Image: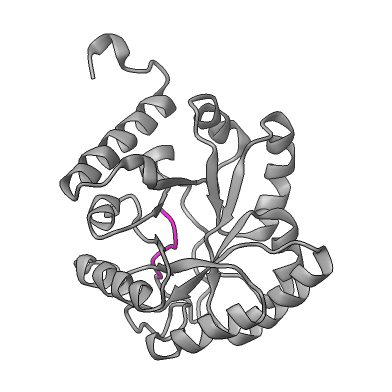
Amino acid sequence: MTTASIPADPAAQRLAAVRDAMRRAARLTDRSADDIRLIAVSKTHDAGAIRPLIAAGQRVFGENRVQESQQKWPALREEQGDIELHLVGQLQSNKAAEAVALFDVIHGLDRPSLLTALARAMDGAGRRVPCFIQVNIGAEEQKGGCPIADTPALIAAARDADIPILGLMCVPPADVEPAPFFALLAKMAREEGLERLSMGMSGDYETAIMLGATDIRVGTALFGERPAPARPVPGSGRGMIRNSGG
């Protein structure tokens, strides 16, 4: 990229840098970056932080929480009608109907009770929202995701319920080399005849691409550091859990 072609806006610069890294990683495995979906994870960022990325051409965004998304995305979608919105965080069953109404893709289908709630919500709304099955790829007790051994049965149940399953999604354990976990998810997807893999975040999306990722969930590399979260309530039992998009 020449000096003259470097975007002036910081958000556009970050977007260009991520897309350049995507192209480099894709070339290493004879893939095209055009086949990889960049999901800009905008959780905790307000509309003022999102608009510059939209202006730079980004159209696919991800959020972690239904309520936060309801507060900012309807207005943003009125401004830009071709936005594709993904729910990349864990979903409570009692929020299924709201999620089906708002999101274009859901990444966190991980248990039978949520499957039942989503199927009911989709029937009621008259629309089938494509989903990824989230796999607890590191077998971490504190993290959501379907156990590896239970994943084939959940996929079969989703298909029986007429829920479109795009592929598999995972969040590898923090502070561990992610490549083996990405490779395992890719193997599981092949065995189930699924083509898409939602894996890779700001710190490891290049590795994920080289191991077959079709959807990467990037937040910090596009938006910068997020505001510090509220401190855990003593005795709440909440520890540090790696985010599903960052």
Judge by depth and name the residue closer to the eye, 41 or 111: 111
Residue 39 belongs to magenta span: no
Q: Is residue 43 visible?
A: no
Instruction: From this view, report whether residue 101 is shown above or below residue 120.
Output: above
- For the point 24% across and 45% down, the residue is 26
Horizontal relation, residue 6 to residue 192: left or right? left
The region drawn magenta spans: 241-246
Please identify the quadrant where the N terminus is shown: top left
Tell me how the rendering is colored: one colour
Q: In this rendering, does residue 55 appear at all?
A: yes
Rendered position, 84 above or below 75: below
Residue 125 relative to residue 167: left or right: right
Q: Position of residue 135 (x, y in %)?
A: 42, 77
> In which image quadrant can residue 5 be found?
top left
Residue occupying image coordinates x 24% and y 60%: 211
Residue 31 on image: x %, y %: 26, 47
What number of labels is visible? Answer: 0
The kind of secondary structure the magenta stretch mainly shows is loop
Question: For residue 61, which quarter of the picture?
Answer: top right
**Residue 113 in the image, given as x and y percentages of width and height:** 65, 85
- The residue at the far right in this view is 124
Looking at this view, name the residue that lies furthest to the top: 4
Query: Was residue 245 drawn as part of the magenta stretch in this picture?
Result: yes
Q: Residue furthest left?
A: 28
- The image position of residue 102, as x and y in percent, is 71, 54
Which residue is drawn at the image coordinates 52% and 27% (left, top)?
Answer: 52
Q: For this rendering, which residue is in front, 43 or 58?
A: 58
